[in-house]
Image (cartoon, rainbow, N blue to C red):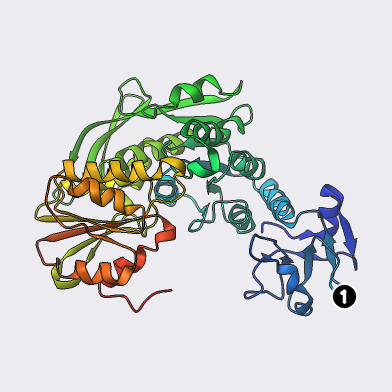
Amino acid sequence: MISALSLQQLQGRFGGELINGSVQFDRVCTDTRKVDAQALFVALVGENFDAHDFVGELEGQVLGLVVDREVPGCKLPQWRVADTTIALGQIGLLCREQFKGRVIAITGSCGKTTVKEMLAAIFSQRHTPCVTRGNLNNQFGLPMTLFGLSRDHDVLILEMGASGPDDIGYLCSIGKPQVSAVNNVMPAHVEGFGSVAAIAKAKGQIYTGLQVGGTAVINADDGYADYWRDHMPAGVRTLEVGLGHQCAIHADNIAMNEHGCPAFDLVIEGLVHPVKLQLLGEHNVHNALVAAGCAFAAGVPAADIASGLGNLKGVSGRLQELLGLRGATIIDDSYNANPGSVSAAIELLAQRAGKKILVLGDMAELGADAEEMHRQVGELARERGLDALFTLGPLGTAASVAFSAGRHQPLHNYRDREPLVAALSHELNQDTTVLVKGSRSARMELVVQALSGNDGEDN
């Protein structure tokens, strides 16, 4: 934290009740397995857990507690509130209000973590950014990022995720961004929203959450760009990025090298800046344009934007190239999956020489159309000339059937990881590229570990 807070401050600002007095703190923890004697402990309640069951054991191990009910017999200072998750966000809000630097927020159906890392690479050249760690992008994770702000930081880069209609609006009320972007909208977490249009509306809260004078970076190539333009708050500036020359920031002369990494001319207000990405896939040009727009809106010189984009070497679990068993090439794209990101992965794999194999774990949270979306992915893999499709999970059957139509090939659909890996290992050689992808629930990183000889490193 930039400055210590107290329970008295929190109670005075947000209400609730103080029990056993107040205490100052400059750290917050929420995990009873990782307590800190100098931290405030927030007892969170989830679907399958309630930290209140353990807080009675924390006396002497933390400075104080945030609870939704008094802990009998506990002498620790306590702030009793109606909802400890809301209280966590309120503590984060006070930390955000202490910060005087620039704040950028990113959301989108896919690629938002890559955009976040691109921004970190850009700003790290001349600044000290505080950046969302890992996937801590929800109502629990975003406050933890805000707790990590220090006097050294001069830029805050927030990734915002959503699984329901009002999530982004809530996160913006805490993070208070000055520059915001929706990277794209695709069918992802449809179950929590009801439709893709509802996803676009929910993601658009990152724009409606901007204050007067803020900047909305709009991906002009996204199908919902007009919707966001029409619903932009008064007094919010817009900066459009995309492949079209009408955009203030656009890409020209895109070319792919032999490894599948794009190079292009980044055009910012008419001036050309060559960029060579070290990331696989032409879709990363779009990610780079959104990152460039956010950085430019935050005052970064165009030359620094271009050099920063070229510095980023990769993001874990997102199209990382590894050496596999028997000399095969493994492309680890296991972090997550939706139909749009799988389509981009298929396009990348199709450009590879030699034998091309896609390994796909079930795409989760797609709602009533999940089977049809898996079928379409299987058809695309067949149309783009992939040599084999291995699927893991019940929904993968639709993809496997569509892929094998007219090929007279056996279906490679599995319910368990071990037989899939065993069958796939027979396909590996120096002429083979295997791309592994799936939703987080499919745990496809374990397939990557097995195919790269690191199956003992499951953590």
Q: Residue sitting at 56 percent across and 53 percent down?
A: 153
Quadrant the N terminus occupies: bottom right
Q: How many marks?
A: 1
Image coords of residue 297 (percent x, y): 48, 33
Q: Amino acid at mark 1?
A: Lys
The residue tagged 1 is 75
Residue at the image position 50 percent from the left and 25 percent from the top: 228
The foreground one among 2 and 256 is: 256
Q: Quadrant of residue 24?
A: bottom right
10 Å crowding of disc 1: few (<14), some (14-19), many (20+): some
Residue 148 in the image: state x and y as whole percent: 60, 59
Q: Quadrant of the C terminus?
A: bottom left
Instruction: Locate residue 264: give its quadrant.
Output: top left
Query: Relative to residue 293, is residue 329 drawn left or right?
Result: left
Whether residue 262 is visible, yes or no, is: no
Q: Quadrant of residue 289?
A: top left
Residue 249 placement (x, y as % from top left): 36, 29
327 displayed left or right of 100: left
Residue 424 horizontal/vertical position (percent):
20, 66
Of 439 and 81, nearer the camera is: 439
What residue lies at 63% left-to-right and 76% top-to-bottom?
33
**Is any part of residue 370 visible from this angle?**
yes
Mark 1 lies on a secondary structure that is: loop
Q: Residue at x 60, y 23 (%)?
A: 233
Residue 238's place in the image compared with 401, above or below, is above
